[in-house]
Image (cartoon, grey):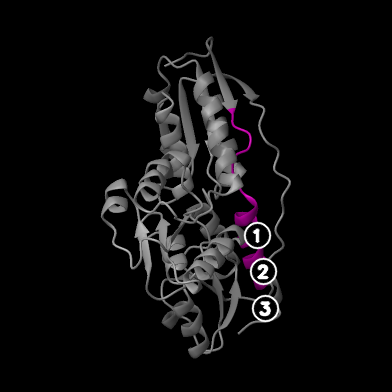
Amino acid sequence: MQNDAENLMVVLAQPRGFCAGVERAIETVRLTLRKHGAPVYVLHEIVHNRHVLNELEQLGAIFVENLADIPVGGICIFSAHGVSRATEEAAKRLGLKTVDATCPLVASVHRMVEKYHAEGFDVLIIGHHGHPEVVGAAGRVEGRVHVISSEEEARQCQVTDPARVAYVTQTTLSKDDIVGIVGIFKDRFPGIRGPGSNICFATQNRQDAVRKLAEQTDLILVVGSKNSSNSNRLREVSERHGTPGYLIDDSGDLQTAWFEGRKRIGITAGASAPERLVKEVIRWMEERMTVTITEIDGKKEDIHFEPADMTDQG
């Protein structure tokens, strides 16, 4: 472990932390609470970060796993990950007022799934089984939709007509996650239609920043929750490029042994992790060693999504 006389260089990723879709979802919950008062119910986690969830709970948000847990007439916010058509219809039957906080980029994937399906294509969704975004996208249509999470599944999936196949991807994957699967699709279905990638700009920008960090550092810390797909991808990108990475919820996860023999530490944060957690990690280091902080050059994100419409509730 370094002593106070030794210096640790901390290199911050740019961009890092909140993306436009996450900011929109959080602001939607805050504005809904401001307009209607507590409680406001949110189906599933609005974003995958327990610190954000705790803050919203203190304001009066109640997170539920089932629509039946919301009283008739209650306000239900759909998370940034999106929901299936069946969930939307069930909310109407239960007499709930709904607010859709689905990330606009996820919503664009929904529209692709619906379009391809309406044109008679089998739709292959590259993504993780059970992830809320994938469940919501697959649930936009009935039949002829397949979730593909591995190259083996890509080789084995059976479609109605090999000449009428299309694909989309989960927005929080990495390029490395999809390249092999897409290659198999193109070999099996030469006429396959698809976007190339639905990986969102914020996900891609953060992964590109980690690649730069990996070239300059001995270790990368990714601030983000364990169930955050984009945060897990950041750690994987770091390790694929030869630099060890740890995914941490906050400074409480840090271990002094990680820093032994390290001179340059990279720090980034997943798209649902607030910047204050990064600052707490830096403060933890400054209390234990001499720290110099720098930031890599990266893409400046100036995209902003307006909060979800709360005036036309079901």
Q: Which residues make up the magenta segment? A: 12-33
Q: Any magenta on residue 246?
A: no
Tag 2 or tag 1, which sits nearer the N-term? 1
Residue identifier under label 1: 24
The residue lying toward the viewer, choosing from 112 and 47, is 112
Can the viewer see residue 288 in this picture? no
Tell me if label 1 and label 2 are in contact, CB under 8 Å.
yes
Tell me if label 1 and label 3 are in contact, CB under 8 Å.
no
Q: Residue at x 29, y 62 (%)?
A: 158
| Mark 2: amino acid | Ala
Residue identifier under label 3: 36
Residue identifier under label 2: 308
* Secondary structure that dominates the magenta span: helix
Q: Residue at x 58, y 62 (%)?
A: 108
Q: Position of residue 48 (x, y in %)?
A: 48, 55
Disc 2/disc 3 C-alpha distance (Å): 14 Å
